[in-house]
Image (cartoon, grey):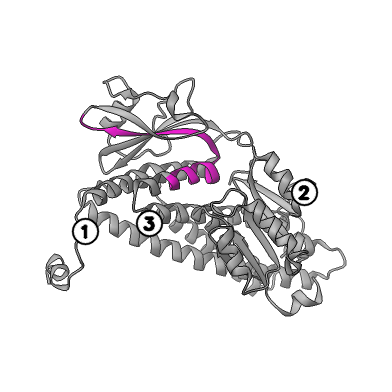
């Protein structure tokens, strides 16, 4: 864990239009004590929230109305503030093409549905460099 | 809980699944006392949070159950596995384990080592899985009770089947009670126009489910045939409202696992009620909330 993460809580943004999925991801992330989690319904809602808070990690679905996950990744990578912030995308097993596009656009990792909480926790810890508890 | 294979990696690398949450404790250079302290602290925190969460689930479950009893006073009692009984059982186990931990600490017993530690780790992983499963039950129940339209119910059902259970192809048929047929209303993993209505003749699975008149639970007939996994009745009380035909699992899902059955049971019981409520709501006249009318309803 870096000096920075030792002194403040980290902010995570979960962008998912499906309420049950969003709740389950938030539940999984709530097991990481160092994280504060904010939820967004879709890409547009995410951009609204991103303008007010600095997030340390973003977890986003791909298929969403209005502004989908691919467009969101592209916009984030074009923004100086979010150029290096880790992005995890949520995909379905069959959506290999979307997954590859998201990774090519700058996403760091992906998880597939149905998600497994322990695996999500482990991945987020790894990416943020947090010690396993 | 189930462990279907899944992609999970930074940029395509695929590390093996590991849920060894005590990995840091294995460091050989850490003293035995340090290990003991860490173990106790981790367990204390884990059980504390687990208990708080489970209590929250029980409260929510009681509220939903009370709501259900109010809307359906003649609803038969169900002694089989329910979310409440699962929650209460788990709470009991958490309390037992907490007591055992406290007793061990009071007796000044040394920190668990070797086989004990391995068993402890395994148990913590099990509890994490159970905790996650309870959360999925809670979220599923909450979503059904928050559904206001039939569209909401269909969306919730689809998301639970796809994202929580891992069923990738299914069709939802609603019951046309006048014509005695099932008609397709939503499909995942196939084309709607390929589907036809299903007659509810006496030999059909639907007619048998209607006759049975209760939600599905583990051990009940699955009414499966060669081309489907099972037919799941969606009921409201004794009324068959809809039938879910589960046709295929997602590629990474080999089959049902233990926790899936309680989710299926919840869908069977709650999705039917949610559809019926949405149907009644769609035909209800909007009336402003009024103190006098509310007090009259309450018998005040």
Q: Nearer the viewer, residue B5 or A133?
A: B5
Whether the magenta-drawn stretch holds residue B169 is answered as yes
Label 2 chain ID? A
User: Which residue is denoted by mark 1 in the rendering?
Assistant: B286
Question: Magenta stretch?
Answer: B155-178
How crowded pointer 1 is (Cα within 10 Å; few <14, some 14-19, many 20+) is rated as: few
Residue A97 lies, in percent from the top left, at 70, 40
Q: Which secondary structure, mark 1? A: loop
Which disc number belongs to residue B146? Answer: 3
Q: Nearer the viewer, residue B90 or A122?
A: A122
Q: Residue, x 58% and y 68% (percent of image)?
A: A48
Q: Which secondary structure, mark 3? A: helix
Q: Residue, x 81% and y 73% (percent of image)?
A: A2
Question: Gap in Å between the C-alphas at discs 1 and 2?
Answer: 51 Å
Judged left or right of residue B167, residue B68 is left
Count of numbered marks: 3
Label 3 chain ID? B
Asked whether the viewer can see residue B122, the reply is: no
């Amino acid at each position: 864990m870096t000096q920075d993460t030792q002194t403040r809580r980290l902010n995570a943004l979960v962008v998912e239009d499906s309420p049950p999925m969003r709740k389950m991801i938030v539940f999984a992330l709530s097991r990481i004590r160092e994280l504060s989690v904010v939820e967004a319904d879709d890409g547009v809602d995410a951009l609204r929230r991103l303008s007010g808070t600095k997030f340390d990690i973003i977890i986003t679905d791909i298929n969403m109305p209005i502004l989908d996950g691919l467009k969101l990744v592209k916009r984030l990578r074009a923004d100086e503030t979010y150029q290096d912030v880790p992005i995890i995308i949520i995909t379905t097993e069959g959506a290999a093409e979307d997954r590859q596009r998201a990774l090519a656009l700058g996403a760091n990792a992906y998880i597939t549905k149905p998600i497994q909480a322990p695996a999500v926790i482990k991945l987020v810890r790894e990416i943020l460099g947090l010690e396993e508890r | 809980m189930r462990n279907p294979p899944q992609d999970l990696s930074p940029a395509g690398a695929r590390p093996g699944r590991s849920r060894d949450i005590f990995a840091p404790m294995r460091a050989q250079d850490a003293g035995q006392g340090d290990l003991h302290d860490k173990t106790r602290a981790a367990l204390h925190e884990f059980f504390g949070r687990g208990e708080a969460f489970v209590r929250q689930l029980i409260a929510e479950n009681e509220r939903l159950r009370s709501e259900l009893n109010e809307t359906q006073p003649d609803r038969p009692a169900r002694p089989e596995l329910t979310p409440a009984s699962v929650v209460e059982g788990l709470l009991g186990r958490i309390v037992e384990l907490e007591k055992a931990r406290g007793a061990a600490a009071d007796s000044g017993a040394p920190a668990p080592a070797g086989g004990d530690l391995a068993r402890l780790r395994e148990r913590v992983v099990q509890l994490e899985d159970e905790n996650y499963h309870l959360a999925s039950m809670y979220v599923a129940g909450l979503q059904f009770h928050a559904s206001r339209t039939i569209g909401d119910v269909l969306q919730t059902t689809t998301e639970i089947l796809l994202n929580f259970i891992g069923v990738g192809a299914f069709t939802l048929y609603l019951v046309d009670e006048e014509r005695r047929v099932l008609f397709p209303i939503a499909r995942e993993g196939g084309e709607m126009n390929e589907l036809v209505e299903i007659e509810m003749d006496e030999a059909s699975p639907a007619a048998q489910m209607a006759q049975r008149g209760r939600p599905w639970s583990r051990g009940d007939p699955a009414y499966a045939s060669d081309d489907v996994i099972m037919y799941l009745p969606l009921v409201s009380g004794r009324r068959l409202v809809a039938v879910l035909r589960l046709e295929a699992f997602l590629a990474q899902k080999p089959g049902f696992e233990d926790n899936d059955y309680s989710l299926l049971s919840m869908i069977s019981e709650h999705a039917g009620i949610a559809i019926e409520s949405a149907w009644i709501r769609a035909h209800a006249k909007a009336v402003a909330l009024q103190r006098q009318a509310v007090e009259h309803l309450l018998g005040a």
